[in-house]
Amino acid sequence: MNTNIFALASGLSDQELLARIAALAGKEREASVELVAHLAELDTRASLYAAQGHGSLFTYCTEILKLSEDAACNRIYAARTCRRFPVILDALASGALSLTSVRMLSPHLTPENHEAVLARASGRSRREIEALVAELAPRPDVPSSVRKLPGVTPAAPPPLSAPAPPPAIEVKPTAVMPPESVLPTSAPAARPATRRPIVETTSPERYRVQFTIGRESHDKLRRVQALLRREIPDGDPGAIFDRAIALLLERVEKEKLGAATKPRAPRAIRPGTDSPVSNGRLTSRHTPSHVKRSAWRSDGGQCAFVSEDGRRCAERAFLEFHHIRAYALGGPTTTENISLRCRRHNQYEAELVFGPRNRGIEGGS
Ligand SMILES: [Zn+2]
């Protein structure tokens, strides 16, 4: 039956496919809102799921409804928060708020602030919600620390029978349950340690960064701390990171963009053309540094593709220098004709000009 859906989908036109996906996403939201509302009711009838052998709504959701732990938590949070502020159901239904956003905001909503906060949160990304939460409940900077993670030293592995040390991670505020919580401790309040890097807004303009480094980098850190003892007396890794990232950024910009402290004058332009000349011959499609810098500046380090309905691409990674008028069609490599594109949009625009079969022609331009 599910292979049938594939067949149906592949038979749709481009427009039909987009319309169908939008409709399905709407249906999914609708179903999810209805589920949240009903879970809110079930939450008030604890004896109902208790009679079925479940000690909490959480285990009922994971074991009977087959929701993942994360999905269960999000829905239970949303259910309880919606009971306090029913207006959230509408925001969930319209897609203005996601379940994750509700979960993050939930501990900070009050009868006094909820309308203003929800209005500000509407349509915001996870990172923006995180910044909003940091503003509502600023947290002090975390002290810098260098900690050895358990059991990663090849030289002296802990005995297998040794109990696992507590995870070296702080529990994020988003993981704090509402007061009426009946979730088990295995639910989000005590999530398993994750080794994923963390960059988290703790208060306006302050960020907590957490990652793991290898022994070599750790030894380098110790050496830098020793060498900079006069400038950074407490050896704060955060202060060293500040300096290191500034140096790295300068170097990477120089490598990628040929950023010069004193920009060189653009090369001579052959009269009657827009193309730079070198020794009297047209230069190749190679993009000179001053052109790269100019494109980077004018496009703000972001893909400059704008869709027909005016939506600008938000990509900032893997950007390429794109010839607005294709190089193969005589488009010059000048500041006016070079613009930033992400890989996908560079390819997409090449396909608009050359067709999908010749995507290699302008790729990387
Ligand atoms: Zn793009």
Image: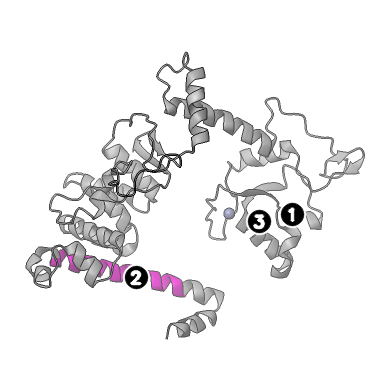
Horizontal side of 296 relative to 51 (left or right) equals: right
Which residue type carries mark 3? Asn
The answer to whether the beta carbon of the residue marked 3 is less than 8 Å from any atom of ligand 1 is: yes
> What residue is pinned by disc 3?
346
The residue depicted at 53 percent of the width and 34 percent of the height is 216
> What residue is pinned by disc 1?
325
In 3D space, how far apart are the residues under numbered discs 1 and 3 (Cα atoms)?
12 Å
Which residue type carries mark 1? Arg
> Which contiguous range is marked in magenta?
20-42
Q: Is 27 covered by the magenta stretch?
A: yes
**The image quarter in which residue 58 lies:** bottom left
Where residue 218 sits in the image (x, y, percent)?
A: 48, 32
> Main structural element of the magenta stretch: helix, strand or loop?
helix
Where residue 303 sits in the image (x, y, percent)?
A: 59, 49
Where residue 307 sits in the image (x, y, percent)?
A: 57, 58
Horizontal side of 239 relative to 333 (left or right) equals: left
Q: Earlier in the sequence, mark 2 or mark 1?
A: 2
Q: Quadrant of ligand 1?
A: bottom right
The label nearer to you, 2 versus 1, is 2
The residue depicted at 73 percent of the width and 37 percent of the height is 289
Q: Which residue occupies the extreme right position in the image?
A: 280
Q: Residues within 10 Å of mark 1 (few under 14, many from 20)?
A: some
> What residue is pinned by disc 2?
28
